[in-house]
Image: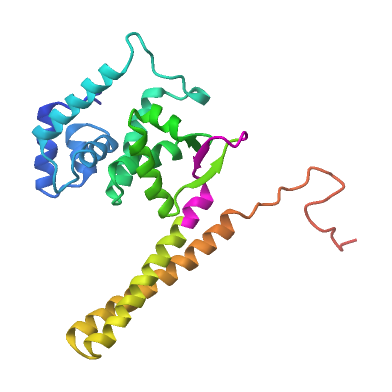
Amino acid sequence: MPGGRLTQQERRQIALGLADDLAYAEIARRLDRPTSTITREVMRNGGPAAYRADLAHHATERRAHRRRQAAPRGAEAPVQAYGRDPEAVREYEEVFTAVMLASGMPSMTARVMARLTLTDSGSLTASELVQGLQVSPASISKAIAFLDSQGMVRRERDGDGRRERYAVDDDVWYQSMMASARAIAQVVETARQGVGVLGPGTPAATRLENVARFLDFVSETTLRAAEQAREILHTKTEMPSDDPADPAEPPSDRG
């Protein structure tokens, strides 16, 4: 399987595959590349509808040039915990970011979310994010404000209380789902108000009523699923006892 960066010719083949509505996996198979490589390439360069081979190639060259300028001469990739491959981690972070972008998240917000999620501690300070992502403090502040509004990060203080940290964990995703369900519920309420304004039974009112019914079902299902998932995933499974005096099964009544 070929390695290294995609060539300009490969990018043109990707563009042709997208034009033919081929799946990423099929494009990857034809180029003998991992599917994740194709996914990342497309998502970071405008998505399937806006991907342009030549623009993507030039953008990649510019990013590589900026990385060379930012890295001190002779600098090595930071050592990764648990013996991880630094290059594999960097590649995966780009894939994760691309998925966040595909979900509709703004670019910088997606990068911040990916960096927080893939950090073992699950939390970073603003200065750590600025240094790690090589962006301005204002960019980090704006991204955090968006994530906070969506319930996707939790603000906490360091032990000395001087610095604010931004954290993600399982409960943050639960809170995000709750925020999403509440936002949908607000749309439902507004749509039903419109039925009264436009007149029940009219085409526009009927359309709004259908929107309200659909989203009401989605909101209720989301809330129920999130609550069930949280309860199941947060329940600790009891481990069997190693004490031979504590049998795993009740004694038999047989003589």
Instruction: Say above or below: 80 vs 192.
Output: above
Task: Please tell me in which quadrant of the rendered image residue 111 appears.
Answer: top left
Q: Which residues are magenta?
A: 159-175
Q: Is residue 232 left or right of residue 214?
A: right
Q: Tell me, yes or no, whether the highlighted magenta stretch contains residue 162.
A: yes
Quadrant holding the C terminus: bottom right
User: Residue 129: x and y, percent?
Assistant: 41, 32
Residue depicted at 25% across the width and 40% down the height: 39
Tell me where residue 159 appears, x and y as whole percent.
62, 35
Q: Quadrant of the N terminus?
A: top left
- Residue 63 or 238: which is nearer the viewer? 63
- Does any portion of residue 4 appear in the rendered image? no
Of residues 34 and 58, the one nearer the viewer is 58
Question: Is residue 72 within the magenta segment?
Answer: no
Q: Residue at x 17, y 85 (%)?
A: 203
Q: Position of residue 252 (x, y in %)?
A: 84, 60
